[in-house]
Amino acid sequence: MQNNTDLDQGKMLQVLNWGYGKALNGVAGMSSASEIAEGYMNGNGTTLDKANSLVRWQCAKAGTSGFVSNLGGLMTMPVGIPANIASVIYVQIRMVVAIAHMGGYDIQDDRVRTLVYVCLVGNNAQQILKQAGVTLGRKVAQRAVNKISGRALIELNKKVGFRLATKFGERGIVNFGKAVPLAGGLVGGSFDYVTTKGVGKAATMIFIE
């Protein structure tokens, strides 16, 4: 098993890509992100209401004792990545991809994929977008996404990979939730509503509002 400090930027991006693929295609016994999204879209309320409901459900599910451990048995993990870490990444990516789908975005688009990764840093999402020269404003987000350059995508991926790998390497799995809001609660069998709200807020800010 790989040591936590060995999870560098490149390995983190590999794990994110693995998690994204699983979120798109689903795994045995679990729905794909689009299937989850479609289920919520059939409910009542605005799209934002439905997205917030999805986030609340995900938090409750994540807080179930043994949830991450059980996920580990369903998937083939990336080489050198502990099952609990890979499971956390899968769960949080699937949630954000579902929200993107609910917002009408093409989740097969590489630009959308990168924005999903940006959401994983929670409250720091806006800062990372700004550093890469990407501005997303309400009502014009879709057009802005279409204009994101290939260079900006590379820059965003690097910043997200570095941010997550650095936080993870320095603080270990117990405090990984400080970098990725949903993760800490998943690992401990409980969850922090305040930090979980950060990743949900980032996702709705980018894909819904």
Image (tube, rainbow, N blue to C red):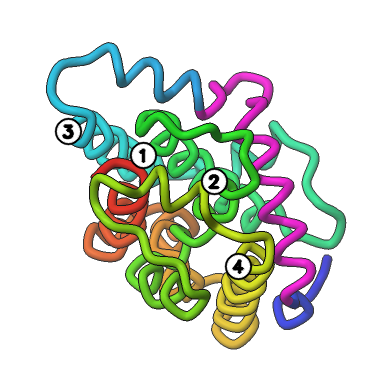
Asked if the stretch drawn in magenta spans residue 29, the answer is yes
Identified by mark 1, the residue type is Gln
N-terminal of the two: label 1 or label 2?
1
Q: Secondary structure at mark 4?
A: helix
Percent across and percent down for residue 42 are: 28, 12
Magenta-highlighted residues: 9-33
Query: Which label was assigned to residue 58?
Result: 1
Q: Secondary structure at mark 1?
A: helix
Q: Residues within 10 Å of mark 2 (few under 14, many from 20)?
A: many
Disc 3 and disc 2: Cα gap in Å? Answer: 21 Å
N-terminal of the two: label 3 or label 4?
3
Identified by mark 2, the residue type is Val
Disc 1 and disc 4: Cα gap in Å? Answer: 30 Å
* Residue positioned 80% across, 39% down in the render: 76
Identified by mark 4, the residue type is Ala
Closer to viewer: mark 1 or mark 2:
2
Asked if the stretch drawn in magenta spans residue 16, the answer is yes
**Residue corresponding to mark 4:** 152
* Residue positioned 77% across, 58% down in the render: 14
Identified by mark 3, the residue type is Asp
N-terminal of the two: label 3 or label 2?
3
Q: Is residue 153 toward the left or the right of residue 180 in the image?
A: right
Disc 2 and disc 4: Cα gap in Å? Answer: 12 Å
